[in-house]
Image: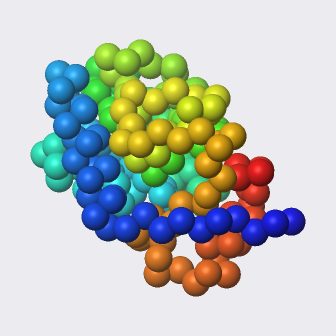
Amino acid sequence: MQKPILTDIEMARFLAQIDLLADAVIASGWRPDWIVGIGRGGLAPATWLSHALGRPMLSVDLSAQVPAFAETLLGELRLRVKAGERLLVVDDINDSGRTIQRLRSALGEADAALLRVAVLIDNSRSAAQVDYRAETIDRAVTKDWFVFPWEKAASRASILADWGEQPDRTA
């Protein structure tokens, strides 16, 4: 198996992405009640976007596979949507679309008046659509494995292990 091209997202680029997302949300005229960070990769961008938009933040962890931090919290978010609260879900990348599809399904396929999704990088070939994106890639062309600023504390072996869990994303 060929190893991926690791592409660092420098802090300046990340901050520019946050500015682009905040500007897009503001320009849309839609104001979320909550920013929701998706663990693990969406937590840092959600925190920054929460500050940029002046909105409180919640989180849910779909990566750890611990029901109390995923399914239980998704149930709580579903109740908030049913009560008419507006959620802006944030993740680092919309790659295959599986995370966003799982989230939308768990939240009862809420419409865009109540649920929107923002990502730093959006794969144009993803099975899921997002509402806000800072950058767009085409996985047929861009095979890089992006290393975001908060991931740089990890060893190269750990980053490659994360990639190894889903190498088809960059195939």
Q: Is residue 68 left or right of residue 14?
A: right
Give the percent coordinates (x, y) of residue 118: 38, 38
Give the percent coordinates (x, y) of residue 157: 67, 81
Quadrant showing the N terminus: bottom right
Colour mode of the rendering: rainbow
Q: Is residue 1 left or right of residue 100?
A: right
Q: Is residue 98 left or right of residue 17?
A: right
Please tell me which residue is depicted at 50% across the width and 59% down the height of the picture: 40
Residue 59 visible: no
**Furthest residue in direction left, as rendered:** 54
Please tell me which residue is depicted at 22% across the width and 47% down the height of the picture: 19
Give the percent coordinates (x, y) of residue 32: 24, 31
**Furthest residue in direction front, as rendered:** 141
Please tell me which residue is depicted at 70% across the width and 72% down the height of the picture: 161
Question: Which image quarter: residue 119?
Answer: top left
The foreground one among 112 and 64 is 112
Please tell me which residue is depicted at 17% across the width and 53% down the height of the picture: 51
Give the percent coordinates (x, y) of residue 152: 47, 76
Residue 65 visible: yes
Question: Which image quarter: residue 89?
Answer: top left
60 w.r.t. 114: above or below: below
The foreground one among 25 and 47 is 25
The foreground one among 6 and 93 is 6
122 w.r.t. 86: above or below: below
